[in-house]
Amino acid sequence: MKYGARNQIVGKVESIKKGTVMCEVKVKTGGGDFMESVMTTNSLKELGIKKGDKVKIVVKAVNVLLVKE
């Protein structure tokens, strides 16, 4: 699969929280940080992602906001 995003991080799926329609996938990066992705449960099934799988995190964002409060 080709895509235009250049920000790619490899990680391991730590947990998956499934809802009726959507799910939240938590991934631990090689550096020990965590990132999360929200997707439909259909997408999760089609991708075959399971806890413990090695995945590539591909990030393409128009805006990344930092807030200090």
Image (cartoon, rainbow, N blue to C red):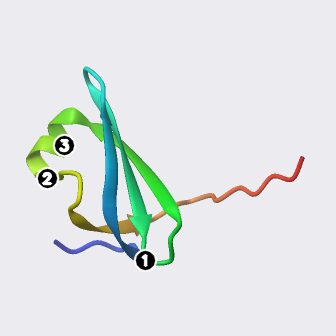
> Label 2 amino acid?
Leu
Q: What is the crowding at mark 2: few (fewer than 14 residues within 10 Å), some, or many (at least 20)? A: few
Q: Picture coordinates of residue 25 (x, y %)?
A: 35, 47
Extreme residue toward the right, this view: 69
Q: Secondary structure at mark 1?
A: loop
> Label 3 amino acid?
Ser
State if disc 3 and disc 2 touch (CB < 8 Å): yes
| Location of mark 1 (residue) | 30
Disc marking residue 47? 2
Quadrant of the image containing the N terminus: bottom left
At x 20%, y 62%, the residue is 53
Q: Is residue 60 above or below residue 41?
A: below
Q: Is residue 43 left or right of residue 24?
A: left
At x 43%, y 77%, the residue is 30
Q: Picture coordinates of residue 4 (x, y %)?
A: 35, 74
How many numbered dots are placed on residues in this image? 3
Q: Is residue 65 above or below residue 69?
A: below
Pick whichever, 40 or 52, lies toward us. Answer: 52
At x 18%, y 43%, the residue is 43
Q: What is the crowding at mark 1: few (fewer than 14 residues within 10 Å), some, or many (at least 20)? A: few
Pick whichever, 11 or 37, lies toward us. Answer: 11
Quarter of the image holding residue 19? Answer: top left
State if disc 3 and disc 1 touch (CB < 8 Å): no
> Label 1 amino acid?
Gly
| Location of mark 3 (residue) | 43
Q: Disc 2 to disc 1, how far (Cα)?
A: 21 Å
Q: Secondary structure at mark 3?
A: helix
Q: Picture coordinates of residue 39 (x, y %)?
A: 31, 41
Disc marking residue 45? none
* Earlier residue among tags 2 and 1: 1
Q: Disc 1 to disc 3, how far (Cα)?
A: 24 Å
Q: What is the crowding at mark 3: few (fewer than 14 residues within 10 Å), some, or many (at least 20)? A: few
